[in-house]
Image: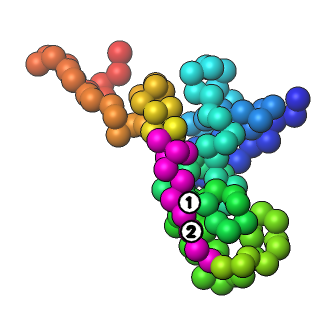
Amino acid sequence: TTPTLFANKGAAICIIDGVGRFSSAPGRIMADDRALVPLSFIDSITREVFVDPVVATDGHTYSRAPISRWLATHNTSPLTKTALTDKRLVPNYALRAAIEEWKEQQPMALDPTRLTLTAGDDAILGAGS
């Protein structure tokens, strides 16, 4: 299967057979299965994991900020290009909870903010080995 690679902000998501794989270096695919990202967690606008997922009147889910920016200048669905009946956005609480649960089960490398650095008194950080 030919992979599809989406690079953004110094990272990449590679879609293979409907499953995303994070890579810290665009163009490289991590073989570690713990890094699998369900395609249903990927925003079609940003190509990143949803942040504050909402459902638009086209029935599709988007991250709130990107779809809000789209709707500020368009009256159509970014996916189907059909006219939207209105621009209301409804929170997708179930998807948000699923993503949060998934994130909690992932290695810390996917979320560097969860890393804790500890070192002994004689450790010299950055000195190499």
Say what amino acid the circle numbered 1 marks. Val
60 relative to 126, above or below: below
Q: How many marks?
A: 2
Q: Is residue 7 visible?
A: no
Residue at x-position 88% and y-position 29%: 1
Residue segment shown in magenta: 87-97
Residue at x-position 69% and y-position 40%: 39
Residue sitting at the far left: 121
> Around disc 1, counting alpha carbons within 10 Å, would you say few (fewer than 14), some (14 to 19), or many (20 or more)?
many
- Report x, y in % for residue 120: 15, 17
63 or 57, which lies in front? 57
- Quarter in which the C terminus is drawn: top left
Give yes or no for contact between labels 1 and 2 (Cβ–Cβ under 8 Å): yes
- Report x, y in % for residue 59: 70, 60
Report which residue position mark 2 lands on: 89
> Around disc 2, counting alpha carbons within 10 Å, would you say few (fewer than 14), some (14 to 19), or many (20 or more)?
some
Q: Is residue 13 magenta?
A: no
